[in-house]
Amino acid sequence: MTPETLPRRTRGRPHDTLLSDVAYGLQPDVRMLPPKYFYDDVGAELFDRITTLEEYYPTRVEIEVLRRDLPDMARAIGPGVRVVEFGSGSGLKTRLLLSALDAPSTYIPVDVSAAQLQRVAAELRREFPAIPVQPLCADYMQPLRLPAVRPGTRTVAFFPGSTIGNLVAEQAAAFLRRTASECDAMLLGTDMHKPTPILERAYNDEAGVTAAFNLNLLTRIERELGAELRVDDWRHHAFYDEAAQRIEMRLVADADTTIVVPAGSETLRYEFAAGEWITTEYSQKYTSAGVRRLAVETGWRVDGEWSDDAGWFTVWLLTSTDRRSG
Ligand code: AVI
């Protein structure tokens, strides 16, 4: 089965625990795991390291764009908005945004990790005492229960980092459609299509941090599910699929190997021949026309587009066409 058919197969199915996603995803005709499972404590730390690597340009370039153009973005957004960030923005990008906006009314980080949210909330409350921080522990791929807001207050979503690119096309469209009904505007970061060598370098760093990030998924499955597997039998592989305009990350078996997963009274056994792989992540790269098309199709109007001089990364201001106040 090709990965493209996966969304159809999984549509409407409640694959939302590590065990159910692993049990489904390791089947011979699927061989794909959702990238959200990269981010346990070790994975989150490895990802932070990735963002500081010389080869991994997206974070650096997006910050460059934000530093240069946030005053313009903030003017276009206007005063007193409520900011909802998808993912718990502990980082520099959140701070830059909150500093640039004119008197934001509230900041709501949304994340599945309660511990991470508490940490972020405490830090930001200290740094921005005038901005109420209301963390929301939730999976932002599901409909959000945002707190009630004073009439007339606009809600602006912040989704930086090109995290949207880790969703397959159908999920990304569904996510954008849903948020267009929940939010009035969105600042969205997208990594742009560019020559293959630059992209492949970014996902195959010399120090092996991305490899460790990918392989940590197996360690997590071993530890959290009590699975029997040999991490040493697997290696990281990342390449740019030019036709699909996306990086594909895989775990490739270097030898014939088995993953055994205890599942209640059952024991699930998955055999892999040397050379077989599990797809662990797509990272979509975009064209300006592609983002514009996607935005319009999902209930948004493009009100701003800011890129670095080389056009490697773009931050978009989208306005919902699906909200009465939008
Ligand atoms: C979080 N996300 C946007 C990263 C990306 O570039 O797709 C995750 C990542 N995977 C490998 N390196 C970074």
Image: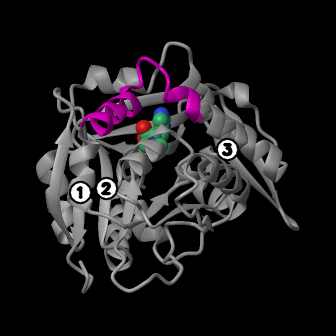
Q: Nearer the viewer, mark 1 or mark 3?
A: 1
| Quarter occupied by residue 272 | top right
The Cα–Cα distance between marks 2 and 3, rounded to whole angstroms, is 44 Å
Q: Nearer the viewer, residue 230 or 315?
A: 315
Kindly identify the residue that appears in the image at 23 percent across and 57 percent down: 317
Does the residue at mark 1 contact the one at mark 2 (Cβ under 8 Å)? yes
| Quarter occupied by residue 310 | top left
Q: Nearer the viewer, residue 221 or 304?
A: 304
**How packed is label 2: few (under 14 Cα within 10 Å), some, or many (20 or more)?**
many
Residue 56 in view here? yes
Residue closest to the far right? 265
Residue interval drawn in magenta: 47-68
Kindly identify the residue that appears in the image at 16 percent across and 53 percent down: 304
Q: Secondary structure at mark 1?
A: strand
Q: Which mark is residue 234?
A: none
Give the position of the N terminus as an image quadrant.
Answer: bottom left
Q: Which residue is mark 3?
A: 271
Specify which label sits upstream in the sequence, 1 or 2.
2
Kindly identify the residue that appears in the image at 31 percent across and 30 percent down: 64
Q: Which mark is residue 187?
A: 2
Q: Which mark is residue 317?
A: 1
